[in-house]
Amino acid sequence: MTIRPHVLLSAAMSVDGYLDDASPERLRLSNADDFDRVDQVRAESDAILIGATTMRKDNPRLLVNSEVRRAKRIADGKPEYPLKVTVTATGDLSADLNFWHHGGKKLVITVDGAVEKVSATLDGLADVVSVGTELDWGLVLDELGRRGVRRLMVEGGGTIHTQLMSQDLADEVHLAIAPLLVGQPEAARFLGAAAYPGGSTARMKVLEVRAIGDVVLVRYAPKERS
């Protein structure tokens, strides 16, 4: 039986629930200390996953930046960097993005109809695997489990967070709440409309609340609902 990874959703959002504003420039929500916390969580993960839309929009490198943390991973018998994963149903990726050219191994999980397109575009920059005719998150987690991923950090975007939460596949949520108000309906939100487990009255367990400078970190256990 395949052991699925522990799924941790990580996001920084404004007080009114936005991941970004609608301007061309990325809205900086976290502060330096919180970025360092995220770096620690990355270092503790076996894989880091983002969606293809987030990759195209933000063009992140998605690395463990601390040399000390990378050295500890190696000392613990792990790769220097966690596996970097993206999912795409369309196969619309670019080989020029930072994601492919920094860090360690990369993996694209896609569908049957896009495998050839992705493989041709990336030309060996990543391992490419299909989970079937449709993108099924249960099968995605099964695939990662077969590859030895025990702790998966998901860094967005909002569509992926929504899908994993609504399908009751998230084990933990880390929310860094910045003292900002965006108020732009066209901007990306942490979660969208969905039929969430337990409905609107189900209360998630709070694991931690902590101030990190002017940012408040809240950790939830979504599956532990009352």
Image (tube, helix red, strand yellow):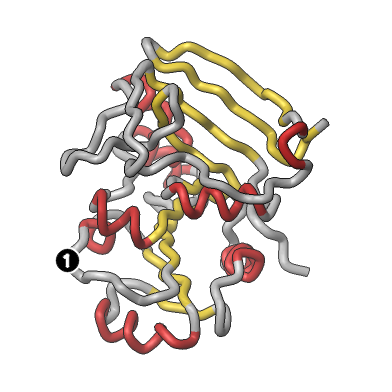
Where residue 44 appears, as percent x and y from the top left, is 51, 40
Residue at 41%, 62% (x, y): give it.
86
Asked whether, in this view, residue 111 is left or right of residue 69, the answer is right
Query: Up-down: is 66 above or below 31?
Result: below
Residue at 44%, 74% (x, y): give it.
89
Where residue 75 appears, as percent x and y from the top left, is 45, 43
Residue with the most extreme right position = 226
Residue with the most extreme front position = 185
The quarter in which the N terminus is drawn is bottom right
Where residue 203 appears, as percent x and y from the top left, is 74, 29
Tell me the SS state at disc 1. loop
* Residue in front for this viewpoint, 143 or 90: 90
Would you name the residue on which mark 1 appears? Answer: 96
From where the camera sits, is residue 203 visible? yes
Residue 16, by quadrant, is: top left
The quarter in which the C terminus is drawn is top right
Query: Up-down: is 6 above or below 205?
Result: below
Residue at 29%, 38% (x, y): give it.
65
Q: How many labels were placed on the picture? A: 1
Where residue 145 appears, as percent x and y from the top left, is 63, 63
Mark 1 residue type: Asp
Task: Tell me the crowding category of disc 1: few under 14, some 14 to 19, or many 20 or more residues within 10 angstroms, Cα based.
Answer: few
